[in-house]
């Protein structure tokens, strides 16, 4: 196996708080170990269109506390093509890059897997997404901050929901994963969470009404995971209008504010641990794995497992919301 002397680093897909902390950790751990680092701009675009710059320790100063990503990010269509990846490979080699660290979610790590298979390049991934939807890891970088952002917003919505005695559907992101909705429901004391994983099991809105939350409460907050198939929170509000007109329902879609903000301590620590581990992994000859965390321990997760796992319902979480909202 060729010796690794220079590492390219990129962030790709939706940004997540803690990506900067991860960029900092990867860069400094690489330099600490005598490697050079190249920062690649706008995800895979930077590889395809040759937009990269050498990184020093100073390049990543004063960023651990910043949301977003100093490298910028994008979803690159060209990289999904054979020609685009060939161009990316040629540019990468011309820049002297021997290995990559890719920070991103599902789509970004799938791209990394295909690229690594085609060109036999050592790549290590870090799970950077607020969605917490990757296999083999208990947590992704950005998820904890997004949860905190959501509960701060829900606490405020609760004031007006209570005053007006209304039913509120608060829609959160998740990319067809219900973790953000379910766990922010637990953390904000919401009356229910409506999540895609439960879709085929039960009519979640019907169940909420049947449970008769109105008997004990005059208002309710329901956390809804975005879902283009059902129309998410707007779809539910429409159903309430038609099927349960006795409820005064309102919708708040939190949108991209969930992706911003200074990362929490938990995300900064996770990103720092994973970033340092990415360099250890590459130096040890690991390739085509994502760094994950299981029961507090860092683990290596093959890209295929990280990106193709089947989501299951967190019944324990669903029960907790139910039990605690009586
Ligand atoms: O994957 C992160 C995410 O924020 C998802 O939760 C959401 O569905 C999607 O990205 C939104 O993407 P965009 O910023 O391209 O609209």
Image (cartoon, grey):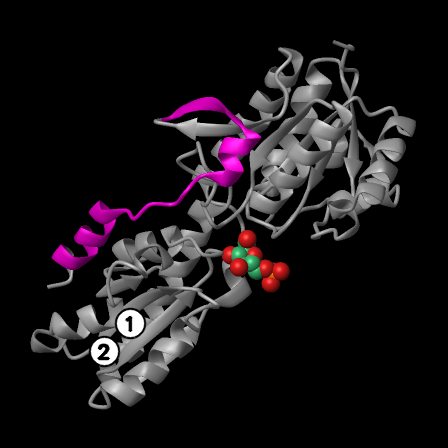
Q: Is residue 313 rendered magenta in the image?
A: yes
User: What residue span does the magenta drawing correspond to?
Assistant: 296-323
The reply to whether dot 2 and dot 1 touch (C-beta < 8 Å) is: yes
Q: Is residue 19 left or right of residue 157?
A: right
Q: Is residue 14 left or right of residue 45?
A: left
Quarter occupied by the N terminus: top right
Mark 1 Cα-neighbour bin, 10 Å: few <14, some 14–19, many ≥20: many
Q: What's the mark number on residue 299?
A: none
Q: Position of residue 79 (x, y in %)?
A: 76, 45
- Front residue of this view, candidates 269 and 305: 305
Q: Can you identify the residue that label 2 sits on?
A: 162
Q: CA distance from mark 2 to mark 1?
A: 6 Å
Q: Residue at x 34, y 54 (%)?
A: 197
Quarter location, residue 159: bottom left
Q: Is residue 63 visible?
A: no
Q: What's the mark number on residue 158?
A: 1
Which structural element holds mark 1?
helix
Quarter occupied by the C terminus: bottom left
Q: Position of residue 104 (x, y in %)?
A: 60, 42
Relative to 325, residue 136 above or below: above
Q: Position of residue 80 (x, y in %)?
A: 74, 47
């Amino acid at each position: 196996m060729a010796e690794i002397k220079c590492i390219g680093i990129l962030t790709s897909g939706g940004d997540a708080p803690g990506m900067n902390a991860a960029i900092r950790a990867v860069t400094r751990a690489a330099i600490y170990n005598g490697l050079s680092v190249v920062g690649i701009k706008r995800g895979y675009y930077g590889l395809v269109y040759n937009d990269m710059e050498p990184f020093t320790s100073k390049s990543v100063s004063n960023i651990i506390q910043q949301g977003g990503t100093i490298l910028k990010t994008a979803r690159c269509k060209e990289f999904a093509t054979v020609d685009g990846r060939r161009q990316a490979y040629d540019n990468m080699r011309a820049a002297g890059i021997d290995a990559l660290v890719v920070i991103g979610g599902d789509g970004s790590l799938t791209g990394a897997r295909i690229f690594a298979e085609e060109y036999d390049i050592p790549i290590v991934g870090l799970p950077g997404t607020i969605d917490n939807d990757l296999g083999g890891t208990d947590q992704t970088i950005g998820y904890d901050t997004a949860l905190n952002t959501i509960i701060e917003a829900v606490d405020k919505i609760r004031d007006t929901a209570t005053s007006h005695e209304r039913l509120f559907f608060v829609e959160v992101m998740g990319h067809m994963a219900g973790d953000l909705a379910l766990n922010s429901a637990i953390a904000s004391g919401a009356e229910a969470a409506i999540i895609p994983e439960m879709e085929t099991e039960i009519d979640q809105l019907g169940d909420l009404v049947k449970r008769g939350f109105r008997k004990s409460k005059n208002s309710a907050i329901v956390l809804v995971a975005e879902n283009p198939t059902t129309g998410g929170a707007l779809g539910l509000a429409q159903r309430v209008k038609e099927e349960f007109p006795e409820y005064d329902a309102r919708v708040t879609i939190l949108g991209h504010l969930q992706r911003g903000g200074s990362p929490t301590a938990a995300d900064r620590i996770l990103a720092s641990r994973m970033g340092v581990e990415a360099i250890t992994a590459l130096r040890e000859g690991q390739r085509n794995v994502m760094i994950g965390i299981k029961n507090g321990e860092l683990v290596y997760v093959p890209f295929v497992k990280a990106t193709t796992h089947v989501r299951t319902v967190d019944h324990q979480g669903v029960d907790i919301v139910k039990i605690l909202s009586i």
